[in-house]
Amino acid sequence: MEVINRIPRMMSVARDMRAEGSRVGLVPTMGALHEGHLSLVTRAREMCDIVVASVFVNPAQFGPSEDFERYPRDLARDAELAFAKGVDFIFAPSREDMYSKDFVTYVTVEGLSEKLEGASRPGHFRGVTTVVNKLFNIVQPNFAFFGRKDAQQVIIIKRMVRDLAMDVEIVVGPVVREEDGLALSSRNVYLSTDERRAATVLRRALEKARILYNGGESDAGRLLSSIRATVEAEPLARLDYAAITDTKQLEPVATISSDGPTLISMAVFFGKTRLIDNIVLNGEL
Ligand code: AMP
């Protein structure tokens, strides 16, 4: 167990692991670890010889008016939780090491990055794909583990890996939720007691749509109306977007087909806190 802060040290450990023929799993995170992250660690532990969890609050994926400065940070706690779940190495580089002053090289998955979350958060996915690419270069994992909570992120990273022939397999874990259905998120700590209660509206709206779909309603417009109505009935919630799309191009669909996966995704504001959630009908990402 070791917390590695410097890129050269991580690269040298990674070289040794590969030379020994170890199967290396990487779980990229921004820290403030919770059971969602730890479920990915558990999966990685099952599949790999060596598990690396990265903890890096990536400035490049935050917009200028977003919560980069106040994002929760507690590396000592993260290390304790991660090591208890069997992580071998925590890679927690500094901002300066990851982004030198004259850093200018970015990776963008065009088209997909501007939709849904990308429309509300311009530049977000450019930051994500750039840092994930850099983490892959440093850690050289055989497997990398991502949560379906961030469905669009999974779709974009899979496309990047395919388009750029990266030698890593992306493994997708299920959404881990609180008992009342709220998806675990490091941002849930921002919620007031009342907002926390209201925040179950994402799950409620999605599950209602699922029930309507299972009852025979496949018209995306009507399902979206139901989602909007559920959110509007919650005074502390303000819908940012809800969308029903395919899972390859993230294009809106008019009718949900039973043949392939369809993504229903949404983002909702509670005060300044923005939470996301999704369900996938008829398949997986
Ligand atoms: P983050 O620290 O928010 O960047 O998340 C790191 C990884 O954990 C990403 O792959 C997320 O999709 C995943 N993750 C975050 N929350 C959850 C959750 N509630 N269930 C499953 N995976 C999650």
Image: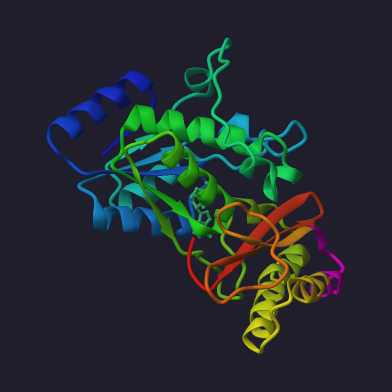
Residue 151 in the image: above or below residue 76: below
Q: Quadrant of residue 256?
A: bottom right
Task: Pick the residue in front: 71 or 150.
Answer: 150
Q: Is residue 233 magenta?
A: yes
- Residue pictured at 53% horizontal, 23% vertical: 95
Which stretch is magenta? 229-240
Instruction: Please provide percent x and percent y for residue 78.
Output: 44, 45
Task: Pick the residue in front: 193 or 232.
Answer: 232
In what quadrant of the picture does the N terminus appear?
A: top left
Instruction: Please provide percent x and percent y for residue 260.
Output: 52, 69
Residue at the farthest bottom position = 215
Q: Is residue 60 magenta?
A: no
Instruction: Please provide percent x and percent y for residue 197.
Output: 72, 70
Residue at the farthest left position = 20
Horizontal arrangement in the rendering, residue 164 relative to residue 112 (left or right): left
Can you see residue 92? Answer: no
Task: Pick the residue in front: 213 or 171.
Answer: 213
- Residue pictured at 56% horizontal, 24% vertical: 106
How is colour applied across the structure in the image? Answer: rainbow
- Residue pictured at 39% horizontal, 26% vertical: 5
Can you see residue 116? Answer: yes
Instruction: Please provide percent x and percent y for residue 271.
Output: 82, 54
Q: Say how many tags the image has.
A: 0
Q: Quadrant of residue 189?
A: bottom right
Residue 159 in the image: above or below residue 271: above
Horizontal arrangement in the rendering, residue 121 relative to residue 108 (left or right): right
Horizontal arrangement in the rendering, residue 63 relative to residue 44 (left or right): right
- Residue pictured at 68% horizontal, 48% vertical: 117
Residue 48 in the image: above or below residue 109: below
